[in-house]
Amino acid sequence: MSHHPFDETTEATLRKRQSVKWAHYPSDVLPAWVAEMDYPLAEPIRRVLRTALDENDCGYADPSSLGAAFTPWAKAQWGWDVGVHDVHVACDVVTGIAEVLRVVTAPGDSVVIEPPVYPPFAATILHLGRKVASAPLLLRDSGYEPDLEAIERAYAGGARAHLLCSPQNPTGMVYSEAALGRIADLADAYGVWVLADEIHGALALPGAIHRPFPTVSRAAARRAIVLTSASKAWNIAGLKAAVLVACSDEARDALARLPVDTANHAGHLGILGSCAAYREGAAWLASTVTILNRNRALLGELLREHLPGVRWIPQQAGYLAWLDCTGLGLGPDPALAFCTRGKIALSHGPTFGREGAGFVRLNLATTRSLLEEAIRRMARVTA
Ligand SMILES: Cc1ncc(COP(=O)(O)O)c(C=O)c1O
């Protein structure tokens, strides 16, 4: 399987990183958990950050440039027409979700999620005094799908908002256009806000097409607020900047009710890095998608050879592999045994909802040799 320049990165180099992925566990544990990538930064991003440091330029952000960088990118990437004044800024996607929920729902309202799903969704809803309405994903022979009937039941039951994880974390599912269209029609009929977290959208892998929710139909545009960031696709989560996008007067009114200083909480380096990503980061992103696609195929081979008891539906986007380990006899939270006995740190399935019992989430955004080592360590636990 083809060599990629990012494969040159060594474990010794990565162990110098101080971000949580590499800093959290002792040095005998290989980290493959939190969603950070092990690749070198895109050169245009490195350049703007270096200049800022050289100029002692670490003050508050001027968020006004992000919309102008994001909109041509969205048009080129997805044919998505976004007005520059319809791009709002927040410090990160999760904070943006919380701020939007505060203005479009009231305490006690229900908010739909589709577990297994990114753990901060439920945590944020509950922290705000809203209720979680669960519409778990379905697993069909063809892969994961949203349960449209369960979504309609939740909407009919009074839900006011839906946190749509599109593409989905942890399964890597890309919602079909038909499913998004149906969700939009239902949301329009029941007056539900769809907060579409599309942070993994730029990492759609060959074979899948990510559709920004508002592009699906007029109903979708009416009900949607999209939240996204360069942080995931360009691996700059520590810099802090995200965008919130409105595509209808209804959504514009909602975003106009955000606290006035929301944008000012973005990080200065985050705004600089995100603008560089959107303006000049296409080549790096294409290269990253190439290695992620290679690693997805490699993971399939490695699992077949070393962990045949693990079931996996390959992700359609992103770099997270949702591994069904229920056949291994490692209990409801296999990440515990993998970490203590295998010295490989994975994300704990049950944190994604009760549907995650017996699962782990593996981060495959690493080099070939570290992915091979991760699977060797997992296999050791099952031997
Ligand atoms: C679906 C999803 N949303 C949001 C985030 C975090 O985004 P941010 O750091 O901008 O809050 C992640 C991180 O992995 C994610 O997977």
Image (tube, grey):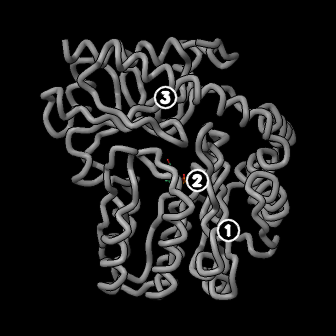
Query: Do we see residue 178 in this rendering?
Result: yes
Q: Nearer the viewer, residue 38 or 217?
A: 217
Q: Given the image, on which type of amino acid does mark 1 rest? A: Thr
Mark 2 surroundings within 10 Å by alpha-carbon count, few (fewer than 14), some (14 through 19), many (20 or more): many
Q: Quadrant of the N terminus?
A: top right
Pick whichever of labels 1 and 3 is earlier in the sequence: 1
Q: Nearer the viewer, residue 34 or 18?
A: 34
* Residue at horizontal 27 percent and vertical 54 percent from the top: 353
What whole-number distance in Å separates the C-alpha atoms at marks 1 and 3?
30 Å
Determine whether the residue tagged by mark 1 lies in a helix, strand or loop: helix
Mark 3 surroundings within 10 Å by alpha-carbon count, few (fewer than 14), some (14 through 19), many (20 or more): many
Determine whether the residue tagged by mark 2 lies in a helix, strand or loop: loop
Mark 1 surroundings within 10 Å by alpha-carbon count, few (fewer than 14), some (14 through 19), many (20 or more): many
User: Which residue carries the number 3 mark?
Assistant: 364
Vertical side of 253 occupied by 202: above or below: above
Q: Is mark 1 within 8 Å of ligand 1?
A: no
The reply to whether callout 3 and callout 2 are in contact (CB within 8 Å) is no
Residue reaching furthest front? 141
Pick whichever of labels 2 and 1 is earlier in the sequence: 2
User: Which residue carries the number 2 mark?
Assistant: 199
Determine whether the residue tagged by mark 3 lies in a helix, strand or loop: loop
Pick whichever of labels 3 and 2 is earlier in the sequence: 2
What whole-number distance in Å separates the C-alpha atoms at marks 2 and 1?
16 Å
Residue 276 in percent (x, y) is at 81, 45
User: Which residue carries the number 1 mark?
Assistant: 215
* Residue at horizontal 44 percent and vertical 38 percent from the top: 34
Residue 75 in percent (x, y) is at 80, 59
Residue 349 in percent (x, y) is at 28, 42
Q: Nearer the viewer, residue 47 or 173?
A: 173
The picture quadrant where one finds residue 228 is bottom right
Q: Is mark 2 within 8 Å of ligand 1?
A: yes
